[in-house]
Image: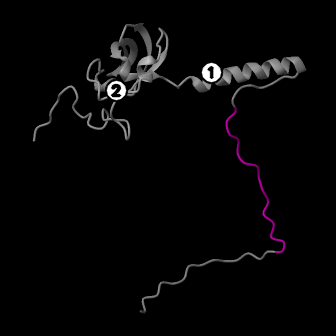
């Protein structure tokens, strides 16, 4: 059999609605506000064919550069050969959602600012950089009151 090469080829699972996600689209999807500079994730909603981005942009993160009545312009970087090209795509609001990729960073910035303020009041120097997980501390196994026991497997027996 031949292989179809249509616009939506190979999107049987990527564009399908999730479990208990079918039916009417939530009103909150349309009530979200998008501003220029917002970071958004492009997640295609298979129930809405209008304003649907091409399949290669599904799951990508971009920056909003234009906002219209029902759609949003997003700048996405696409890998073409050995370089990344800036692509400007127009996507309806059903197919995007606010990205949570910077939430952890912004929370850390706020926490560090509060810690720095407290340290300045107390006159203490603080290290606010994240530290990698260090190796566990060494332990000594004592044999006092315990005799080492050798464990060997039971030989396989073929008798029935």
**Which residue occupies the foreground of this view, 28 or 68?**
28
Magenta region: 131-145
Q: What residue do we see at 56% from left, 22% from top?
A: 102
**Would you say residue 123 is visible in this rendering?**
no
Principal secondary structure, stretch drawn in magenta: loop
Residue 46: in sight, yes or no? yes
Image: 157 above or below 117:
below
- Mark 1 vs mark 2: which is more N-terminal? 2
Q: Determine the image quadrant of residue 111.
A: top right
Q: Point out which mark residue 44 bears.
A: 2
Residue that sits furthest to the bottom in the current view: 160
* Relative vertical location of residue 32 with respect to residue 130 in this rendering, above or below: above
- Check if residue 147 falls in the magenta segment: no
Q: Is residue 156 left or right of residue 91?
A: right
With respect to residue 158, does 140 lie above or below?
above
What kind of element bears circle 2? Answer: loop
Residue at (88% x, 17% y) in the render = 121
Along the line of sight, the residue nearer the viewer: 134 or 15: 15
Above or below — where is 149 with respect to 10? below
Give me the residue at 38% from left, 11% from top: 73
Where does label 1 land, which residue?
106
Q: CA distance from mark 1 to mark 2?
A: 27 Å
Left/right of residue 66 with respect to residue 104 in the rendered view: left
Residue for point 30% across, 38% down:
13
Figure quadrant of residue 129: top right
* Rendering coords of residue 157 (x, y %): 46, 87
Q: Is residue 135 magenta?
A: yes
Dot 1, how many residues are within 10 Å of its Cα: few (below 14), some (14-19), or many (20+)? few
- Name the image quarter holding residue 41: top left
- Residue 100 in the image: x percent, y percent? 52, 25
Residue sitting farthest toward the left: 1
């Amino acid at each position: 059999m031949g292989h179809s090469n249509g616009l939506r080829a190979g999107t049987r699972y990527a564009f399908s609605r999730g479990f208990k996600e079918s039916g009417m689209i939530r009103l909150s999807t349309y009530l979200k506000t998008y501003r220029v500079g917002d970071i958004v994730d492009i997640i295609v909603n298979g129930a809405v064919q209008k304003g649907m981005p091409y399949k290669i942009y599904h799951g990508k993160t971009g920056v909003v550069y234009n906002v219209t009545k029902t759609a949003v312009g997003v700048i996405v970087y696409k890998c073409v050969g050995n370089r990344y090209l800036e692509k400007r795509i127009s996507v309806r609001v059903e197919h995007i959602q606010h990205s949570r990729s910077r939430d952890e960073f912004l929370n850390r910035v706020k926490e560090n600012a509060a810690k720095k303020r407290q340290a300045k009041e107390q006159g203490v120097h603080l290290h606010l950089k994240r530290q990698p997980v260090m190796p566990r501390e060494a332990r000594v196994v004592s044999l006092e009151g315990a005799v080492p026991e050798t464990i060997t497997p039971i030989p396989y027996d073929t008798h029935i």
